[in-house]
Amino acid sequence: MAPPAIDRSTNASVGRGPNFPGSGTAVVGLQWGDEGKGKVIDLLAGSFRAVVRYNGGANAGHSVVIDGKRHALHLIPSGAFHQGVMAVIGNGVVLDPDMLFVELDRLADAGIRSLDLAVSDRAHVVLPWHKAEDAAREIALAAITDGSGSGGSIGTTRRGIGPAYADKAHRAEAIRVGDLLRPASLRTKIAHVSARKEAMLRALDPSGAAAASLPAAAKMTDDLIRSGERLRPFVTDTMYLLHHMLNQGHNLLFEGANATLLDVDHGTFPFVTSSNCSVLGISTGTGVPGERLSRVIGVMKAYCTRVGGGPFPTEQDNDAGNRIRERGREYGTTTGRPRRCGWLDLVALRYAVMLNGVTGIALMLLDVLSGFEEVKVCKAYRLQGKTTDRFLPDAEALAEVEPIFETLEGWEAEISGCRSRDALPAAARAYVDFIEQAAGVPVDIVSVGPDREQTIRG
């Protein structure tokens, strides 16, 4: 039976339903991203009325493998592959319309033509000058690295995400999705802002290349107006929409992009993204208060990876790291960049579990560790001659720590065919148990391969 229709109008019910019936589940990354959140969301989405993206932009990529075919999404929530599940892009997202349309077209080519999509009218728009500024700043920062852990480029995807969030804070120069539906005022605004952006880009890049990359203001406006018309059927006040669904007894799945250690407030600053990508970003990114969350699933790899700059205490720039990278296909969904790889960091894991209020863990890519004779985990840090079990969410401080490793027994057998914990080799089971004990929360999901079916539950 098809799910009931949802009222998208701004006249949908307000406040709490009589029995406060609906609730939310959050899926959030516990490391530096790329943990496999897309697979977890895809596994769970069929039990929810909507999957809601609340932060980030096209700098984040989620991959889902279905029947051996890999699908990459950057803006559309991963639940899009389930019929009857609405995909909601909340106000906390910065939206690149061109990237969204590319994804819609690819989904249509894959046979998904009736996507139930809602886009917040208050989501901010990524514009050409944001991408030009992002690239120019990265080039300028790369020239001033100081070796302290806080100098040098951030390692962004150059998709314009940080500058778009900066304009959101600046307010006057920002463009929101709702503005795309008002052509006359949009044309005036783009004309006024364009000159200031060109001057700023010339200051950042004296060669003039960044400023020259911008389209003329009139053409930019025409393109945005066309984007607005294509977006119009999807645009709504998603805050009212989500509360209406909750009040009707529907459950929502909140999809985090990026990950906790990249959170702009709680991550390894300044080597972070530009949004609150922990669970703490849900309320501001959607308008749904935290009290509506009943479950928080933290997604982690069986090891650690990182993309871009910044300290990484357990990084293995050696044969072990290279082996993890190749077995785990550790190359960025968005950029294709090789990821830095290393052993599991329990100090960082405990910090992320605490910050997010995690109720259960999804342990991903356990199969990548098959074949190692021994597996190491970082159980504490050594800093200035003292041992600490506290994570340091500051790049310069974290760059100074030395990881204290504990060595565990590895396992030779391939485990991609296992469908229960009992079927895992004894050492693999012991590794899962060790993580549960260290994190203080149960491991509810264990992934032993990229496909939907290669999953152990409970």
Image (cartoon, helix red, strand yellow):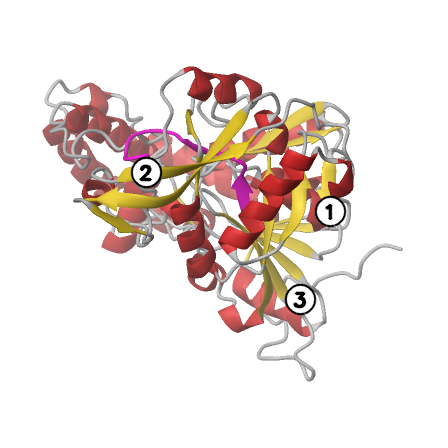
- The span shown in magenta is 298-312
> Between disc 2 and disc 1, whose residue precedes?
2
x, y percent for residue 193: 23, 43
Numbered tag placed on residue 245 in the rendering: 3
CA gap, disc 1 and disc 3: 28 Å
Camera-side residue: 412 or 184?
Answer: 412
x, y percent for residue 358: 53, 59
Which residue has dot 2 on it?
A: 403
Question: On the picture, is 116 further left or further right than 33?
Answer: right
CA gap, disc 2 and disc 1: 31 Å
Numbered tag placed on residue 199 in the rendering: none
Secondary structure type for disc 1: strand
Question: On the picture, is 180 further left or further right than 39?
Answer: left
Which residue has dot 1 on it?
A: 457
Closer to the eye: label 3 or 2: 2
> Between disc 1 and disc 3, whose residue precedes?
3
